[in-house]
Each structure stands twice: as C-alpha cells, then as structure tokens.
Amino acid sequence: MKYTVIIEKGQESGYVAYCPALRGCVSQGETKDQALRNIKEAAEVYLEALLEDGIAVPVEIGKESVEVEVEVMTK
C-alpha cells in the first residue's frame, strides 16, 4: 500500500512527518530521511493495529495536491 506523507521542519528542531489518510499517524526525526523511516514504521504499526481490531484499512484514492497563494492585508 502507498500513502502520502507530509514532512515539515519541526518548530524547534528536526522534522515532523504525518500521513493524512491515517489520522493521528505522526512521527519525527532529526533528519528528513529519519523522519521518513520513522513514519513508515509508525504507519505499519498503525495498519497492523487496525487489522487486529477488525477495522477497515484506509485506502487513498482520488488525491490531489494543490498549492494556494494567500495574501494577507495588514493595517
């Protein structure tokens, strides 16, 4: 299975990774590569838990990635 993973720079240090299709599946790492390895492991554990509990595994379909430019008016 393949899922979209978002990796962002952490507020203080390192990187945070999360998988939008797997609600609450979040991990982190000192580097982007480490964060990616960690979120992969977290997703595997997450999916195993769903299967053990008899819960359907989320499937990502029809995803679309869009960037939006926002203008902010200041006084």
Image (spheres, grey):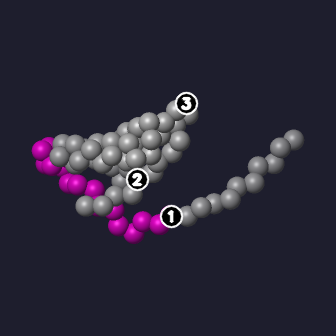
Can residue 23 be seen by looking at this rendering?
A: no
Give the mark nearest the N terminus, 1 or 3.
3
Number of marks? 3
Residue under pointer 2: 5
> What is the x, y in percent for residue 25?
34, 43
Residue under pointer 1: 65
- Residue at screen point 44% across, 36% down: 30
Q: Is the residue under label 2 in contact with that under label 3 (CB below 8 Å)?
A: no
Answer few, some or many: residues within 10 Å of disc 2's Cα (few below 14, many 20 plus, some between 14 and 19).
some
- Magenta segment's dominant SS is loop
Q: Is the residue under label 3 in contact with that under label 1 (CB below 8 Å)?
A: no
Res. 4 image quadrant: bottom left
Q: Amino acid at mark 2?
A: Val
Separation of marks 1 and 3 at Cα, in angstroms: 27 Å
Up-down: is 57 above or below 49? below
Element at badge 3?
A: loop
Residue 59 colored in magenta in the image: yes
Element at badge 2?
A: loop
> What is the x, y in percent for residue 49?
18, 43
Give the mark nearest the N terminus, 1 or 2.
2
Answer few, some or many: residues within 10 Å of disc 1's Cα (few below 14, many 20 plus, some between 14 and 19).
few
Residue 12: image tag = 3
Res. 71 image quadrant: bottom right
Separation of marks 3 and 2 at Cα, in angstroms: 20 Å
Q: Amino acid at mark 1?
A: Ser
- In the displayed structure, does residue 71 sit left or right of residue 41? right
